[in-house]
Amino acid sequence: MFAYLFIIFFSMALISVVNIFFTMTAFDLTIFSVVFTVFIASFIVFLIDAVVAFVIHKLPNKWFNPYKKIYHVFGFERNFYESIGIKKWKDRIPEMGQLCNFKKDKIADINNNEYVFKFLEETCYAEVLHLFSAFLGFLVILFFPIKYAFWITGPVAVVNLFLQILPVFIQRYTRPKLMKIYERNIRISKISQSVN
């Protein structure tokens, strides 16, 4: 969580400083108004993300079945995720599942298939939620004069895009392993039922 907060506040400070030096006079702004505009733009993006999360979690579970084609993870994706060192940083990305009563930072009960399937569904929820948040964050541009799009609101939206895409990568990287566990549990269950 610290890394994310650092990135957010560092980005806000950087966007503010760049605008103070390069656009403040052109946009007829004060230092305070530059910093305030960056803060408000960041807050609006946060609200957009919160609304997206609320709406996504109200959708039916059947839309988030990990066996749907939309959630299929291709081999080249896994290679890409490993090439960007996902194993090294994936545990540093904040996991907000506790907000919807399902933590995904580690598997609590690997042999409970009901739990594993719920975990798989939650990876699909998280993927969709973060993907929509990544792109809908650009709506912040509509809340301000268009002249701010390149210098203030666009950069805020790009930071949000970056912070939202990383969890999408993590969900897509993790899901195939979970599916193997789920399918292994099904096979073991069938074998034990046939023996009895």
Image (cartoon, rainbow, N blue to C red):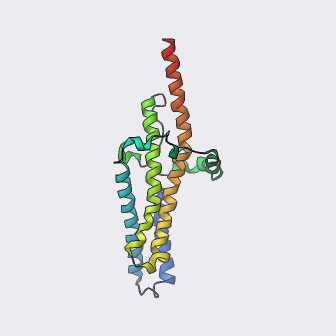
Query: Residue 155 vs residue 77: left or right?
Result: left
Instruction: Give the image quarter of residue 144.
Output: bottom left
Query: Residue 18 vs residue 61: left or right?
Result: right
Query: Which residue is pictured at 41% across the width and 84% down the height?
Result: 29
Q: Depth check: 22 or 53 in front?
A: 53
Q: Depth check: 65 or 52 in front?
A: 65
Position of residue 114 measured from the top left corner of the image (x, y, whole percent): 42, 31
Q: Depth check: 40 or 121 in front?
A: 121
Number of residue marks:
0
Position of residue 6 measured from the top left corner of the image (x, y, whole percent): 48, 62
Instruction: Relative to 19, say whether 89 is above or below.
Output: above
Instruction: Relative to 189, say whether 57 is above or below.
Output: below
Position of residue 66 measured from the top left corner of the image (x, y, whole percent): 48, 40
Taking the image as drawn, is residue 170 in sight? yes
Q: Residue furthest front?
A: 69
Taking the image as drawn, is residue 3 in sight? no
Instruction: Relative to 195, say whether 57 is above or below.
Output: below
Query: Which residue is pictured at 49% across the width and 31% down the height?
Result: 110
Position of residue 148 measured from the top left corner of the image (x, y, whole percent): 45, 78
Query: Which residue is pictured at 56% across the width and 39% down the height?
Result: 176
Query: Residue 173 vs residue 38: left or right?
Result: right
